[in-house]
Amino acid sequence: MTGPMTTPLPHTQQDIRRRNLSLVMHALATQGPLSRATVAGQIGLTRAAVSSLVDELVRGGLLVELGPEQPSGTVGRPGSALALGKRGPVGIGAEIGVDHLAVCAVDLCGKVRARATAEGSNRGRPPEPVLKELGELVRQVTDAARGSGLRPAGLAVAVPGLVARGTRTVVRAPNLDWADVDLGAAFPYSGGLSVDSLSVDNEANLGALAELWIGGDPAPQDFVHVSAEIGIGAAVVVEGRLLRGTHGFAGELGHVPVRPEGPRCPCGGRGCLEQYAGEEAVLRAAGLAQAAVGRPVDLLAERADRGDPAVRRALRGAGGALGIALAGAVNLLDPQAVVLGGALSRLAPWLLPSLERELARRTADPARPSLIVSRLGSEGPLLGAAHCVVRAVLDDPAAYAAR
C-alpha cells in the first residue's frame, strides 16, 4: 500500500493524536514489521510518544507484538517487532457485475480472508432481488470472517454505473437498466453492518484505486485506468488522487464517441466506444454473439490464442477504437501511464498493437504514456472496494477503535 495522503494540519491535541495514530498504522502497512524505535525514526516522533500510540493500537486489536527483533549489531536490547493485526478489522468489498455478484473480506495486511460469488445475469433485474442476493453473500462472508476472529469494519460496493458524488445513489447504470437507485435505502443490511458503514462507487474508480494501492511496485501516481466487461469504464488518478469531477461522473470513456455516425448506444448517443470495444460488440464482430456462455472473455482469449482470424480481427478493431478514445484523454491529461484492467488485461496481447498504433498517430511523441497491463485484472474493482474500507481504518484508526 502507498502511504497516507496529505491531509490538512490538525488543530487540537485530539486531532494531532488521531493523525499520529494514522502515521504509525501507515508506516507498518508499508514497511512492517518494525520496532517502536524504527517507527519513531520514520514518522519523526519520540520513542516515548510512539510507545503510547502503539499501546493504544494494540489494545484496539489493530497491532500485534511479534517478539524481539533479530539482532542488528547495534548496542542495546533488541526492540519488540510490531505488525498489523491479522485478527482485527477486515474490509468487506462487494461487486455488482452485469453477469455476477462477488463479496470478499480483506484484512489489514491486504490478504483476502473470505470470499463468495454468484454467477448469473443481472441485466434488467430489478434492484431488490439483486441486492437481496448480494446481501446473502455479504452475510456469508462476514460470518466466515467472524469465525476467524475478525471484525468487519465496513462495506464498500462497486457498481457498473454513475454514482452521485458523496452519496450511495446509482444515478444510471445502463447495462443493468437501473436509474436513481439509492443503495443506502435499498440494501438489506446483514452481518452486523449498517447504513453508516456503507459506501458505493463506480467499479472503474475502485479498480483504479486498487491499482494505485496494490497493483504494482512502484505504482504510477498519474494514470488513466481502463476496464471492460459488458461496458467500458475509466478512471483518472492525478498525483495519487482519484479525479472524480463535479458530480462524481469523471471517467465515462465508454461513452466517448469514436465514430459519431455509428450505431445507437443505450446511453442515447451514437458511435460510443462501447459499441466497438465492449464485450458484446467484440463478440458480435467475431461472430460469437450466440456462442458465448459463462465468461465470454475466456472464449475470446482462447479463440485468439488459437489464431482464430475473426476473433483476432475483432480484437484489432476494438484496440483501434480504444486508441482513438484514449488519445483524447492522453492529449488532455498527459498521464504517466494507461493501465488496462478488467477483461482488457486478459485480451491485451491482441488489443495492444492496434491501440498503440492509434495512440502513436494521435498523440505528441513526448506525451505518449506507458501502457501497463494490470496484474489485478477483473479482480480490481472487488479488491479496490475492500481496500477502501481497510484504508479508512489506516487513515483513522481512532474512529474504528472507538466503536
Image: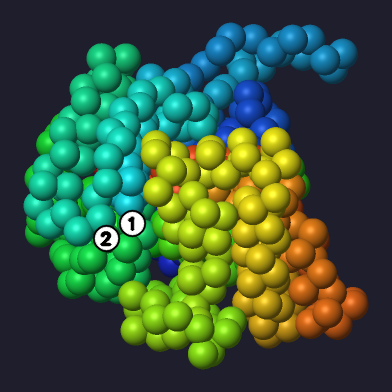
| Residue at the spot 30% in from the left edge and 22% down from the top edge | 145
| Residue at the spot 40% in from the left edge and 23% down from the top edge | 113
**The image quarter in which residue 123 lies:** bottom left
Q: As rendered, which of 325 and 188 lies closer to the eye? A: 325
Looking at the rendered structure, the secondary structure element under dot 1 is strand
Q: Position of residue 65 (x, y in %)?
A: 52, 16
Q: As rendered, which of 306 and 119 lies closer to the eye? A: 306
Q: Position of residue 396 (x, y in %)?
A: 40, 48
Q: Position of residue 221 (x, y in %)?
A: 69, 61
Q: Position of residue 233 (x, y in %)?
A: 49, 64
In the picture shown, does residue 361 fall above or below 351? below
Graded by Cα atoms within 10 Å as few (under 14), some (14 to 19) or many (20 or more), the crowding at tag 1 reads many
- CA distance for labels 2 and 1: 9 Å
Question: As shown in the figure, which amino acid type bears the numbered disc 1?
Answer: Val
- In the image, 265: left or right of 96? right
Q: As rendered, which of 98 and 282 lies closer to the eye? A: 282
Q: Earlier in the sequence, mark 2 or mark 1?
A: 1
Looking at the rendered structure, the secondary structure element under dot 2 is loop
Residue identified by numbered label 1: 159
Q: Residue furthest right?
A: 365
Image marks 2 and 1: residues in contact by CB distance under 8 Å? yes
- In the image, 115: left or right of 238? left
Question: As shown in the figure, which amino acid type bears the numbered disc 2?
Answer: Leu
- Is residue 156 something that shows in the picture? no
In the picture shown, does residue 266 fall above or below 331? above
Which quadrant of the figure contains the C terminus? top left
| Residue at the spot 16% in from the left edge and 54% down from the top edge | 125
**The image quarter in which residue 352 lies:** bottom right
- In the image, 178: left or right of 351? left
Residue identified by numbered label 2: 176
